[in-house]
Structures are given as C-alpha cells and as structure tokens.
Amino acid sequence: CSLSKNKFTNNAYTLERPIKTTMLDALNKVTACYRHLVIALGSTSDSQNLREELKKTRKKAQELAVANRTKLTSLLKDKNISKDDRAEYERLWVLFTSSVELLEVDMKRSLEIGQDFPLKVPTRHLIQTGMTGSTTTVAARAMSVQNMKYEADANIDTVDLKELETEIAQVDQMMEEMEMKVQVAPWAVEAKQEAGAELKSTVSVGNSSVGVISICEEEPKETVEGETGLMKVFAGVIFTAVLLIAGILGYLVINL
C-alpha cells in the first residue's frame, strides 16, 4: 500500500478506508500468526526453524505496525476530515493499538520462554504439550510466501534473544509516542459489530494473502437439530433406566 503525505479530498477518503483496513487486516493476521508460533516455543515442536520463523514474523509485524501508525497518525491529525471519517479512523486506531499491545505481550513471552529453553545447550526437557508437526505453513502464510527459506546461524536461539530485547523496548517506546501524538479514548469508540461476530462468519480468512487460520463454516442446522434430538432421546432412556433400578432396589430393601 502506498502512503501519500498529501491532504485528501472527500472523494479520496472513500478510497483511503479500504486501503487502511487492508493494512490493519494484514497486521492482525501476522500478529495472530506470531502468537500461534510462540505457543510452540519450549514444546516438542520447538526447533531452530521455529526460532527463525518467529524472528521473521515479528519483524514483519513491526513493519506493518509502523506503516499503520504513520498512516493513521497522519489522518487523525488532519483537522479537515469530517466527523464520520474521524469516528472511523478512531475505531481503526483502537483496533491497531490493541494489535500492537498483543504483539508486545507475545514478544515478551517469547523472550521469557526462549531464555528458559535454549536449543543448543538445553537446560531442561522440552514439554509435551500435544502440539505436533511443523509450523512452516503458518509462517509462510504470514510472510506471504509459498516456501520459507531458512538462513539463520545455528546459534540463533541465543543470539536472537538480545535483538528481541531491543525490539521489545522499541515497541514499548512506539506505544508511548502513539499515546502522546494521538488522543483517542478507547471507551468512547463504538464498535461496528457484535463481539465474536467474525467467528460466526462463513468466509474463510484464507482468501487473504496473509491469512493464518481458516474459520470453519457453521454446520447445517438440520444436522445440529438431528444430533440434539438424539441426545434428548438418549438422556430420556438413561433417566428412565435409573428410575427403574431405583424402584427395584427400594422394593428389595422394603421386603428384606
């Protein structure tokens, strides 16, 4: 997405919204991918490739965060935008800051786990978390490539930790600067959809070039209703059997 520093006319704003939303959507998906990778740290799925995937993915997320910050800051500081446009950009700003906060949290978690589970000189056994297989596909989707290329040195598990500490400090500083430059109260911004509405969507996010996780389509209502009916019948049978057994036992106890 090209970033223009010129002021926009009213017609230009109609084009700016989808562009801005696409950039923000890309950040959200890459951030979600990074969280997915962080979960595998310290588990039996951990590897040198995972450490390199984490490094590339978080750098991609930071690049998108800077691009979103630059664009949104410029738009929100423009005094000529309409009230409706400002409300929309403030809503996008809240979504953006939430993504950056989640990214920072996961970066800190990655640092802590990485320190506890070095690969070349292991200090403890990897944890069997139930996760199996490679994370290459997830990382490739986040990087918008078909195949990941691994070029890191063998000591990336320790060397990258220092770089990660520096990047965490940079993200924290960026968050502070954002709060100073743009004054947007999150509680004053109205959402455009109900919480969890995206989970009910039948559209797969895999359609995006940076899609991470596909959302399963809802099951047909007929199937769900049929299963519910069977469960009710089964529960009725069990309840009747329990009552019958209780009655027999009560009769035996009285006769004895």
Image (tube, rainbow, N blue to C red):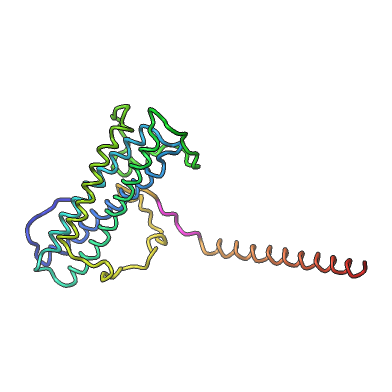
Q: Residue 122's spot in the image, x, y percent?
A: 41, 30
Q: Residue 247's spot in the image, x, y percent?
A: 82, 69
Report if residue 131 lies within the magenta region. Answer: no
Residue range of the region highlighted in magenta in the rendering: 214-219
Q: How many marks?
A: 0
Which residue appears at 38% of the width and 54% of the height? Answer: 204
201 or 158, which lies in front?
158
Q: Residue 97's spot in the image, x, y percent?
A: 25, 58
Query: On screen, 115 above or below 202?
Result: above
116 or 83, which lies in front?
116
Secondary structure of the magenta portion, mostly? loop
- Toward which corner of the image does residue 92 lie, by quadrant? bottom left
Residue located farthest toward the right when viewing the structure as drawn: 256
- Toward which corner of the image does residue 249 lie, by quadrant? bottom right
Query: On screen, 200 above or below 123?
Result: below
Name the side, left or right, on which 175 lies relative to 121: left
Which residue appears at 41% of the width and 41% of the height? Answer: 40
Name the side, left or right, on which 142 lies relative to 220: left
Residue located farthest toward the bottom when viewing the structure as drawn: 83
Q: Residue 132's spot in the image, x, y percent?
A: 47, 39
Which residue appears at 17% of the width and 59% of the height? Answer: 72
The C terminus, quarter of image = bottom right
Residue located farthest toward the left when viewing the structure as drawn: 6
